[in-house]
Image (cartoon, rainbow, N blue to C red):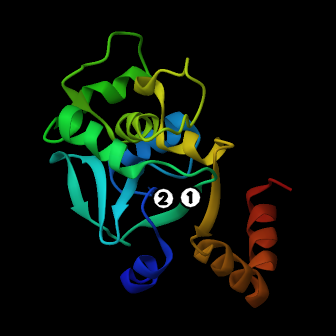
């Protein structure tokens, strides 16, 4: 998706889910059994709020590594969410160690946030409970937004890898794989 296509599609309140590259995004995807590793919330026609490595802030919308776009099924109060963000989260450092809470028990930092923690708290301040009130925002992963009944997917990345596999099979790849497996003694 191009940036201009994305800007034409999204509206304030939409959740942008990304599939990042590198070790930490890979670790998040593996641990959470999800194809996504990052979330940002659209707050204006050209901006999102997010917790990135550089901290919690308002950022320009990006289509790079975008995996899916999800829209709240109910109206939300973006202004109330932004009021919470400005008072409570803007400028906070990225909570890299908080990510390890996915792996270990412990108390989460109140002065730092990671992306899905920030998104959960924003939606709650905007009047939308994305999960249940008992769900600790510190334990929410980006992929959990894909399972929330409060959101509907409005765009997903094409399965380029799947198309590549189909083309490979059509060009004789399947027969090659069978021959190779037989040589290895696997079949």
User: Looking at the rendering, which quadrant does residue 118 occupy?
Assistant: top left
**Residue placed furthest toward the top:** 106
User: Looking at the rendering, which quadrant does residue 115 occupy?
Assistant: top left
Q: Residue at x 29, y 46 (%)?
A: 82
On the picture, is 85 further left or further right than 180?
left
Q: Secondary structure at mark 2?
A: loop
Is residue 75 visible from the viewing direction of this image? yes
Q: Residue at x 33, y 53 (%)?
A: 22
Front-most of 164 and 35? 35
**Residue placed furthest toward the right:** 187
On the picture, is 161 further left or further right than 141?
right
Q: Is residue 7 above or below residue 134?
A: below
Tag 1 residue: 70
Q: Residue at x 40, y 35 (%)?
A: 125
The mark total stands at: 2
On the picture, is 88 further left or further right than 36?
left
Q: Position of residue 67 (x, y in %)?
A: 51, 64
Q: Residue at x 59, y 68 (%)?
A: 156
Tag 2 residue: 14
Q: Is residue 15 above or below residue 155?
A: above
Q: Position of residue 36 (x, y in %)?
A: 50, 51
Q: Position of residue 48 (x, y in %)?
A: 31, 59
Q: Say which quadrant the C terminus sits in.
A: bottom right
Q: Position of residue 13 (x, y in %)?
A: 45, 56
Is residue 24 visible from the viewing direction of this image? no
Please report contact status of discs 2 and 1: CB closer than 8 Å, yes or no.
yes
Distance from Cα at disc 2 to Cα at disc 1: 6 Å
Front-most of 149 and 81? 81
Q: Residues within 10 Å of mark 1 (few under 14, many from 20)?
A: many
């Amino acid at each position: 998706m191009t940036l201009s296509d994305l800007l034409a599609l999204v509206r304030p309140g939409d959740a942008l889910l990304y599939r990042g590259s590198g070790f930490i995004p890979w670790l998040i995807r593996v641990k959470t059994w999800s194809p996504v590793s990052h979330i940002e919330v659209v707050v204006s026609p050209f901006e999102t709020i997010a917790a990135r490595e550089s901290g919690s802030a308002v950022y320009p919308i990006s289509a790079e590594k975008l995996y899916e776009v999800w829209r709240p099924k109910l109206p939300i109060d973006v202004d109330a969410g932004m009021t919470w963000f400005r008072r409570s989260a803007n400028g906070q450092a990225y909570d890299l160690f908080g990510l390890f809470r996915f792996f270990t028990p412990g108390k989460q930092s109140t002065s730092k946030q990671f992306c899905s923690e920030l998104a959960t708290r924003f939606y709650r301040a905007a009047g939308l409970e994305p999960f249940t009130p008992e769900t600790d925002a510190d334990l929410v992963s980006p992929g959990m937004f894909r399972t929330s009944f409060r959101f509907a997917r409005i765009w997903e990345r094409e399965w380029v890898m799947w198309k590549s596999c189909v083309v490979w099979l059509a060009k004789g790849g399947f027969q090659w794989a069978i021959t190779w497996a037989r040589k290895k003694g696997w079949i």
